[in-house]
Amino acid sequence: MVALGPGARSTGAVTALPANRQAWSDDGNNISEEDEVTRRERTLRFSLAGVQLKFSALQNEGKGRGLTIPAKGVGGDWIVKLPAAQFEAVPENEFSFMTLAQKIGIDVPEIDLIDLKMIEGLPDGLGRLQGEKAFAIKRFDRSEEGPVHFEDFAQVFGQYPHAKYDDASYRNIASVLGIETSQDDVAEFIRRLVFSTLIGNDDMHLKNWSLIYYDRKTPSIAPAYDLLSTIPYLPSKTAALKYARTNIMAKFTLDELAYLAAKAKLPEKLILDTAKETVAAFQEIWPKEKQHLALGRNVIDAVDAHMETLVLPKEC
């Protein structure tokens, strides 16, 4: 069932709900060992919304790569994420893995890694920040004609922001994409899901996946954002959501992907071929690029160790 969402302002503002209007969920209500692991880890869940200050910014004219945070108004065409107070070099982490994602074919907006001193208009009293760089990403919900409507999957499923880890799975997202978008969009979703698992990103919750309506009526998967490795900061064994039957990254296998495809009524060959191609691209590029990215040794070591725990790369 697809219903017009509260406060919808365009044809594309829709909310997808099951026919009985209950929350999306996976089969069964039994509390498994995996659910218990999730509950324990959720108390430590790494969420960028909680550790980084974000500002909308304008690109300076004639001033190199500098940005200005407006004192008032609606902001600009860039989102700037400052260093975190709790964790070291988060902007470098996100810039590096977004760069890597782009190299393996994921749709990534224009991004930059800039010195804090190149940002004008930062508020006073920011306190101690873990780094001197900021991550900047160009907004994909802006065009020369004005704002472009998009909605994250918390909105699609009618979930409040605080419930972004609850009552839905990646299989549910895939189901919506299979109904509402193209096979290219489905492949892009699988590409990002595999990539996030490989790098140890345990924070791909509902608000980190979105639909965008470039023509104001036809949904597509929105460009990628918030792709980074979270495990160097808070080690985790689980993804933010269940894949289909499990949320444990080490159990994300070709069989789990085939099950996801079947339940979401998607072509199994498309899902498995995309997963295999993504793993192959990552295994080719990561060893060559990791030393040239803006990553500390601790991040590289954490990702390498995490890769050793995964079954999917060995299967492919």
Image (cartoon, grey):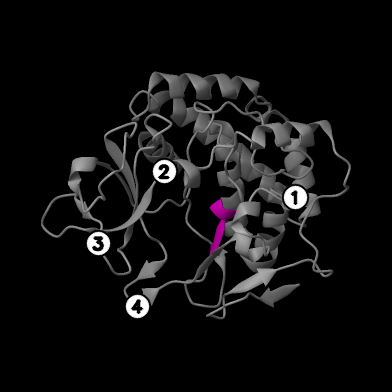
Q: Give me the C-alpha separation between circle 3 and circle 4.
A: 21 Å
Which residue appears at 57% of the width and 78% of the height?
A: 8
Image: 183 above or below 74:
above
Query: Horizontal and vertical percent for residue 28?
Result: 88, 47
Closest to the camera, between mark 1 and mark 4, is 4
Q: Amino acid at mark 4?
A: Glu
Q: Which mark is residue 145?
A: 4
Q: Secondary structure at mark 2?
A: loop
Residue type at mark 2? Gln
Spatial CA span between label 1 and label 3: 45 Å
Magenta segment: 206-211
What is the C-alpha distance between the residues marked 3 and 2? Answer: 19 Å
Label 3 element class:
loop
Q: Residue 52: which disc?
A: 2
Left or right: 118 as drawn, with respect to 62: right
Query: Quick one: quadrant of the C terminus?
Result: top right
Question: The residue under label 1 is which amino acid type?
Answer: Ala
Q: Assess whether mark 1 and mark 2 are in contact (beta carbons under 8 angstroms).
A: no
**C-beta proximity under 8 Å, tags 1 and 4:** no
Q: Earlier in the sequence, mark 3 or mark 4?
A: 3
Residue 252 in sight in this render: no
Q: Is residue 268 visible?
A: yes
Q: Mark 3 sits on what residue? A: 70
Residue 137 in the image: x percent, y percent? 35, 51
Q: Earlier in the sequence, mark 1 or mark 4?
A: 4
Up the image or down, 277 lies above or below 283; here it is: below
The Cα atoms of the two marked residues, 1 and 4, are separated by 37 Å
Q: Is residue 271 above or below residue 181?
A: above
**Mark-to-mark CA distance, 2 and 1:** 35 Å
**Residue 93 vs residue 213: left or right?**
left
**Residue under circle 1?**
261
Residue 280 spot, x, y in % from top left: 55, 33
